[in-house]
Amino acid sequence: MTDVPEPLGVTVRRLDAGEIDAVLDEVFVRGVRSRLLDAGVAGVAGDPEVPQWMLAELGDGRITGVCPRGHWHRSDGPATADLSARPPVTAVDRVRVLEVLVFAPHAQIRVGEGARAGWISGDAPGELPSWSRPRDRSFLLQGWTGPGHGRSPGEGVPLSVTAEPSGARAVLPVLWAGFSARVRRERGGRAVVEGTGSWLTVREYWAQDPETGAVGVAFHRLTGVCTGPKPTGPVFDPGTGDEPSETGGRGPW
């Protein structure tokens, strides 16, 4: 059996039981920032100045949240509890955990099923060849707000309740911006279509098969939730729908 090639440019460290306990206690019981993301660990830098986000998939539902500074705003709060699962605050509750992701621009914590294992990941130090550098991507969050489609949980709460025309609803950890697009002119007069909306951002890491030389995405981590212009490519030619490259042809993300 051929070994799976290691992803390039990323450090992944397994968490011990005490570290997993601390993450769940901070996020779900005390409602404070993750110390591991603030301080970092060997091989993964910390950053106490950036927002943190959380996505928890549980056997009976989902919890989302954002921690801009000192404390968490979570979907299980009073204004949105009807759309959220209840938090796993006791040892018995952990059987409900399918996956908990706590993430920031620089690093991500993943706690796996039943909270039996966990990992922290972030950029590895050192330079990489241009073809193997991590790729940042952004994905449009679906949903509508406004009369009949959604609501805000309250003034100063950085969450949004969105609804699809189908009736499906979700609590998202962002002050919502609906999708729109505009044509803008780049240097040299080229026209491109640029989207604006609410985005989930992701960093992807590559690996190369040593036998075939094939390159593919081997690991990814979530890096944030934001609103505004699309933070990563592609942009599109308004006439053809192609993704323009610097040389005028069809280009990559």
Image (spheres, rainbow, N blue to C red):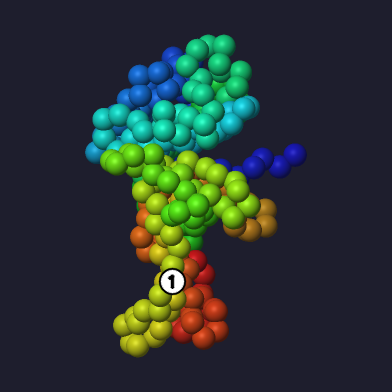
Q: How many marks?
A: 1
Residue 121, placed above or below residue 115: below
**Side of 241 relative to 52 (left or right):** right
For image coordinates 33% across by 35% down, the residue present is: 67
The quadrant holding residue 212 is bottom right
**Side of 164 relative to 10 (left or right):** right
Q: Quadrant of the N terminus?
A: top right
For image coordinates 49% across by 76% down, the residue present is: 236
Residue position for label 1: 181
**Side of 238 relative to 49 (left or right):** right
- Given residues 2 and 16, the one toward you in this image is 16
- Given residues 149 and 222, the one toward you in this image is 149
**Side of 68 relative to 202 (left or right):** left
For image coordinates 31% across by 82% down, the residue present is: 187
Residue reaching furthest top? 91
Q: Where is residue 2 in the image (x, y as percent from the top left)?
A: 71, 42
Which type of secondary structure does the marked residue at label 1 adopt? strand
The quadrant holding residue 95 is top right
For image coordinates 49% across by 82% down, the residue present is: 238
Residue 32 appears in the picture as rendered: yes
Q: Position of residue 54 (x, y in %)?
A: 44, 35
Local crowd size for mark 1, using a 10 Å CA cut-off: few (<14), some (14–19), many (≥20) = few
Kind of residue at disc 1: Ala
Residue reaching furthest right? 1
- Given residues 232 and 147, the one toward you in this image is 147
Residue reaching furthest front? 147
Residue 226, placed above or below residue 194: above
Residue 179, placed above or below residue 10: below
Residue 205 appears in the picture as rendered: no
Q: Where is residue 216 in the image (x, y as percent from the top left)?
A: 60, 55
